[in-house]
Image: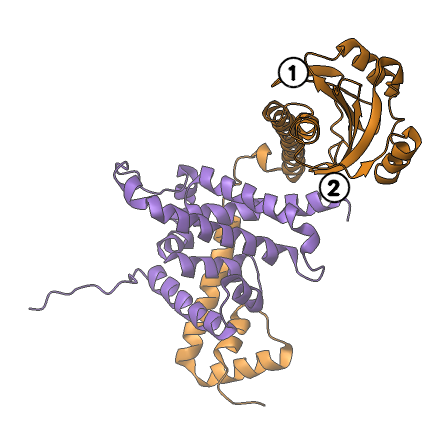
Chain colours: A purple, B orange
Amino acid sequence: MPYHAIDAQLRELLPRLRRFALWLTREATSADDLVQSTLERALSRWDSRRDSAALRPWLFTILYRLFLDARRNAKRYASMLERFRFGDEEEHPSVEREVMAQSVLWSLERLPPDQRNLLLWVAVEGLSYEEIAQILDVPIGTVMSRLSRARQALRRLNDGETTTPVLRLLK
Amino acid sequence: MNTTIPSEYEIHAYIDGRLDESRRQAVEFYLAQHPERAEEVRAWQRDTQRLRAAYGALPAMADNPALDPARIRARRWQRFRARLAMAAMLVLSLCIGGFGGWQVHGWRFARAMPPMGDAMAAYRMVAVNQSVPLDVVSEEDSVLQAWLDKHIERTARLPDLHDAGYHPIGGRLFATDQGPAAMVLYKDAEGHAISFYVRPPGPMRDLLPSGQRADGGLLAQYGSDRSYNYAMVSRVDGTDKRLVAQALERVI
């Protein structure tokens, strides 16, 4: 495949990758760094990709694995970084927050990351359950049960409930 | 119609519109009979659709030219070339370092081992201390030349010192690090001795520039042709060194 054709394919998926990376990292610069690393790795491994493998799940797999690696490395320094953070909460850009405020995305943001990723892959990116099982490296049955829990959690949030059990004062 | 309870997979596939028609109908049939389950599934379906719509409605992120695949490809190529250049530099410096190191080794070796020290040692053993006998004893030039040719291939002609009053008396082989060396000894009527010493240059082709040096009352004059190192050793006093030098010059 000629370079420009490859580049065109990647360029088309770029907005989706960036958006998903933003949900993962919660910070625009980190998100684009992650996407950049993803594209670099994709280009370096392009020849080893099986032709049958769909491009979109392949890219999401690379991106997610890189994210996990980066987070693992970051955790080593987390305690050190903690001391330098002064209420610097992870936030989406303000424009996004406005849009999200009135939508189901507000609930989505309150889900645990694993459930959020799963819903984005299934509902938005249209990845097959099998592809998701490969990304997460778990059996397909696990994907299905996690998906059930994610949908239940989203439902509860949309209904105004919370996912975490609330302590009730007993009279 | 299949009335078994749909699997978890089938429920999700139903919500996400990934079932074929017959299985979709089977799930519909099941849900029609189980209103509570049906209500939950419809709600999940609504959430999914709202999620997709809301996500799609998010404003586009600001363009980031650094992420363009063509740009990243170009950067990769640049980095590759930079690494290639660095690797080339590394190889080059290794070569320079290795070659230089070997040169220094050679110089130090040369300093540690003064040239043709073995020729002088051989002279001492045979002509001064007479601690070892000659392998071949003959005063015939032709016999000694044949003996020399047999042991040292393609070597030079023996020097002719008859005019100076010296005649050959015999020869002896020596083992050296560079290979077998041969010495032919000449004497004059008063018993002054001159040795003619031939040694291969060894695997490093360590050929000597012409020169001379004195050590312990002995003078070695030496030089090389393209195949061997030669030395002629005599006592510092008692032998005309110019005579020896001329003889060596003719040989080389």
| Count of all numbered marks drawn on residues in the image | 2
Q: Is residue A53 left or right of residue B50?
A: right
Viewer-closest of B185 and B206: B185
Q: What is the quadrant of residue B70 in the picture?
A: top right
- Judged left or right of residue B68, residue A22 is left
Q: Is residue A156 visible?
A: yes
Observer able to see residue B50? no
x and y percent of residue A63 in the render?
A: 53, 51
Give the percent coordinates (x, y) of residue B54.
48, 52
Work out whether residue B73 or residue B150 is closer to the camera in this orientation and state it.
B150
Give the residue at x 72% y 59%.
A51
Residue drawn 59% across the image and 81% down it: B23
Chain to which the residue tagged by mark 1 belongs: B
Residue A42 image offset from top left, x and y in percent: 62, 49
Label 2 neighbour load within 10 Å: few <14, some 14-19, many 20+: few
Which amino acid is tagged 1? Ala
Mark 2 lies on a secondary structure that is helix
Direction front: furthest residue = B190
In this view of the protein, which residue sits in the foreground, A16 or B231?
B231
Residue B201: where, in percent of width, then height? 76, 31
Q: Which mark is residue A4?
A: 2
Q: Amino acid at mark 2?
A: His
Q: Is residue B122 above or below residue B36?
A: above
Is residue A39 depicted above or below B171 in this figure? below
Badge 1 marks a residue whose secondary structure is strand
Q: Which of the 4 image quadrants contains residue B197?
A: top right
Relative height, residue B95 to residue A51 (above, below):
above
| Mark carried by residue B115 | none
Would you call the spot at circle 1 few (<14 residues within 10 Å), some (14-19), or many (20 or more)? some
Q: Residue at x 88, y 20 (%)?
A: B160
Please give the label number shown on residue B214: 1
